[in-house]
Image (cartoon, helix red, strand yellow):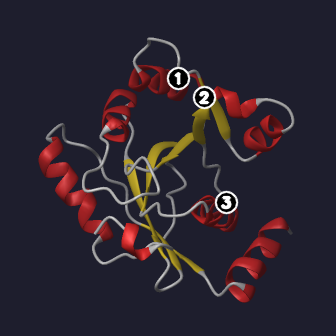
């Protein structure tokens, strides 16, 4: 019933659609959401995952997980991350993958909602370390589509792999078009 309500709001009222899917057999992956130009992107993710009936997670600084917001962030799939520790964040997040039966980590390789010219590469190294595929997801505001692409398995050749991954986002415009990656 909840899926029907989400789909009615997202598709009928707001006029958006979800294109593609996440394979049933993929229980662990890194989902890269691009472009990330607005805080509205969080809600696109929430709606699209409900429509797909998939658990999709995120990590955020542990300071966000205090009362009263902590309940909301955990309910929406959040896992707290201690950013003050001297531990390597890639290793820390890879351990989270090991500790969970299902963990689909959504992350923005841009690292901010502002205009950037290069992606941060932590997502790539997390996928390698956790031995999971990367699923590119485009937030296409121009066409009102959240597009789930096919899983990509990193080859350890980051330069070539990033070219392939970035090709999924050519001409995709975010909510704030001038901040879109391409």
The answer to whether marks 3 and 2 mark residues whose Cβ atoms lie closer than 8 Å is no
Q: Residue 139 location, x and y as percent?
A: 48, 69
Estimate the spatial distance between the alpha carbons at disc 3 and disc 2, rounded to whole Å: 20 Å
Residue holding disc 2: 100
Q: Residue 178 location, x and y as percent?
A: 38, 73
- Judged by depth in the image, the label closer to the viewer, 1 or 3, is 1
Q: Quadrant of residue 135?
A: bottom left
Left or right of 86, for residue 144: right
Residue holding disc 3: 46
Q: Quadrant of the C terminus?
A: bottom left
How many marks the image carries: the answer is 3
Q: Which of marks 1 and 3 is nearer the N terminus?
A: 3
Residue holding disc 1: 83
Estimate the spatial distance between the alpha carbons at disc 1 and disc 3, rounded to whole Å: 24 Å
Left or right of 133, for residue 140: right
Q: Can residue 141 be seen in this view?
A: yes
Left or right of 78, for residue 121: left
171 vs 54: above or below: below
Q: What element carries label 1?
A: loop
Q: Quadrant of residue 86?
A: top left
The answer to whether marks 1 and 3 mark residues whose Cβ atoms lie closer than 8 Å is no
């Amino acid at each position: 019933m909840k899926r029907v309500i989400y789909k009615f709001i997202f598709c009928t009222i707001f006029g958006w659609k979800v294109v593609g899917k996440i394979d049933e057999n993929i229980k662990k992956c890194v989902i890269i959401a691009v472009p990330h130009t607005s805080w509205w992107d969080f809600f696109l993710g929430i709606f699209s995952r409900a429509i797909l009936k998939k658990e999709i997670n995120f990590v955020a600084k542990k300071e966000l997980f205090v009362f009263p917001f902590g309940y909301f962030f955990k309910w929406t799939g959040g896992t707290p991350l201690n950013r003050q520790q001297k531990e390597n964040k890639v290793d820390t997040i890879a351990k989270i993958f090991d500790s969970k039966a299902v963990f689909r980590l959504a992350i923005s390789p841009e690292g901010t909602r502002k205009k950037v010219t290069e992606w941060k590469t932590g997502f790539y190294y997390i996928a390698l370390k956790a031995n999971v595929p990367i699923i590119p997801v485009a937030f296409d505001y121009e066409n009102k589509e959240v597009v789930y692409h096919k899983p990509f398995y990193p080859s350890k050749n980051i330069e070539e792999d990033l070219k392939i991954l970035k090709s999924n986002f050519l001409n995709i415009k975010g909510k704030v078009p001038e901040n879109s990656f391409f």
